[in-house]
């Protein structure tokens, strides 16, 4: 189960987070601005999270296998069709809509299934599953740069689309329906969403999303602007992916000793600290340092957020609850990259995306500090385990 979720995250987010590698060649061919391309990324990532409550609920009711299989079809169709499109508005529909729907069908249904299957060592199982995001980024970003250099971005899309669809179909076949199925307690879920702990989780995650997604769009163009070659620039996304695995597994591993919420806040502090390197970056080595530190913080946040939600609110209806929680990332995608793109186009300076992301990291850190576990909810979770 955890293996299937790992490879689902590996494929879906690995392909999604290569966007920065495709930004320059696609914007040049379609003659669109960086702001327009950042909107495309916002459509992809925003849909992947805004559709998550619906795909999570479908997985809660009918099991994850069918939903993830649908995601495999969306993945293949999105990239194979986009490789043949020559109008940018259609790219918003095929690439943005198709890939966003694919991620929504894969990520929350498979991750929530792991959360519902594992009562013992749930935190470790979730951390291992979500580490597929980092591993996928590590492999897909440099691979995409090589494919673009050799064949062009269209054939690169065809290769990624066909391979990704096959791998996701295999993942769907390996998933099994969790032991808790059927109608969920919707009233209880709505009550949880209205609580103060959920509000702090949601807003801090949204702001962290801005600090995470701006680099995925603008780090590679920033690197090329200071003279870094495309493959080396794409490798920065790979470094983020590799260090995020360390954050997902390492911070998660010590959470039982130091406390899950304490380590969750530590991950936010690491994310904030990483921006010291990018704000002062004038060399490739500085960007590598940023990527490594930022990836660790981002990985810890992504890995522990589902476990934090499960520890506070329990596991019943976890798919729907996580789907609602992760719409915060969707809001971040709609706000962060487009704002950064507008500022970059207006000033012709890629430092402005750094300022946007760093400011969001500061606010996220301030909002996550007061987060506390509800004692009554903790008792319920302990009883469920």
Image (tube, helix red, strand yellow):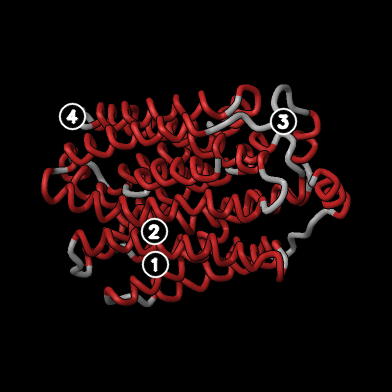
> Measured from the top left, where is residue 365 in percent x and y?
62, 65
Cα gap from disc 1 to disc 2, whole angstroms = 9 Å
Farthest residue in the left direction? 150
Q: Secondary structure at mark 3?
A: loop
What residue sits 31% from the left and 42% below the top? 36
- Number of residues whose C-alpha sits closer than 10 Å to that of mark 3, classed few (under 14), some (14–19) or many (20 or more): some
Mark 1 and 2 residues: CB-CB less than 8 Å, in contact? yes
User: Which sits in the foreground, 44 or 347?
Assistant: 44
In front: mark 1 or mark 2? Answer: 1
Residue to which mark 1 is pinned: 291
The circle on residue 86 is 4
Location of residue 268 (image quadrant) = bottom right
Residue to which mark 2 is pinned: 215
Of callouts 3 and 2, which one flags the residue occurring earlier in the amino acid sequence? 3
The circle on residue 180 is 3
The answer to whether 29 is drawn above or below residue 237 in the figure is above
Cα gap from disc 3 to disc 2, whole angstroms = 38 Å
The answer to whether 283 is drawn above or below residue 124 in the figure is below
Of callouts 2 and 4, which one flags the residue occurring earlier in the amino acid sequence? 4
Location of residue 30 (image quadrant) = top left
């Amino acid at each position: 189960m955890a293996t299937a979720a790992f490879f689902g995250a590996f494929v879906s987010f690995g392909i999604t987070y290569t966007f920065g590698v495709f930004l320059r060649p696609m914007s040049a061919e379609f003659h669109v601005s960086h702001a327009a391309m950042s909107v495309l990324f916002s459509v992809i990532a925003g849909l992947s999270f805004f559709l998550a409550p619906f795909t999570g609920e479908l997985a809660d009711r009918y099991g994850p296998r069918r939903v993830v299989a649908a995601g495999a079809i969306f993945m293949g169709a999105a990239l194979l069709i986009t490789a043949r499109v020559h109008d940018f508005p259609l790219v918003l529909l095929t690439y943005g809509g198709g890939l966003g729907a694919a991620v929504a069908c894969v990520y929350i249904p498979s991750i929530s299934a792991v959360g519902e299957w594992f009562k013992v060592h749930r935190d470790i199982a979730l951390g291992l599953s979500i580490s597929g995001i980092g591993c996928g980024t590590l492999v897909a970003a440099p691979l995409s740069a090589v494919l673009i250099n050799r064949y062009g971005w269209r054939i690169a899309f065809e290769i990624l689309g066909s391979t990704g669809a096959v791998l996701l179909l295999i993942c769907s076949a390996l998933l099994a329906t969790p032991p808790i199925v059927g109608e969920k307690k919707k009233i209880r879920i709505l009550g949880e969403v209205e609580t103060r702990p959920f509000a702090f989780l949601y807003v801090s995650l949204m702001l962290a999303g801005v600090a995470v997604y701006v680099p995925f769009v603008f780090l590679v163009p920033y690197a090329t602007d200071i003279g870094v070659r495309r493959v080396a620039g794409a490798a920065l996304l790979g470094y983020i992916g590799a260090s995020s695995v360390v954050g997902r597994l390492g911070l998660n591993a010590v959470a039982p000793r130091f406390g899950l919420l304490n380590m969750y806040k530590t991950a936010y502090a690491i994310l904030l600290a990483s921006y010291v390197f990018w704000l002062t970056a004038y060399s490739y080595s500085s960007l590598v340092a940023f990527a490594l530190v930022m990836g660790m913080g981002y990985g810890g946040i992504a890995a522990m957020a589902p476990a934090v939600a499960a520890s506070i609110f329990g596991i019943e209806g976890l798919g729907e609850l996580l789907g609602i929680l992760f719409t915060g990332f969707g809001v971040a995608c709609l706000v962060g990259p487009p704002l950064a793109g507008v500022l970059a186009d207006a000033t012709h300076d890629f430092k402005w995306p750094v300022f946007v992301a760093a400011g969001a990291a500061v606010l996220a850190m301030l909002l996550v500090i007061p987060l506390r576990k509800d004692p009554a909810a903790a008792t319920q979770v302990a009883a469920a385990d």
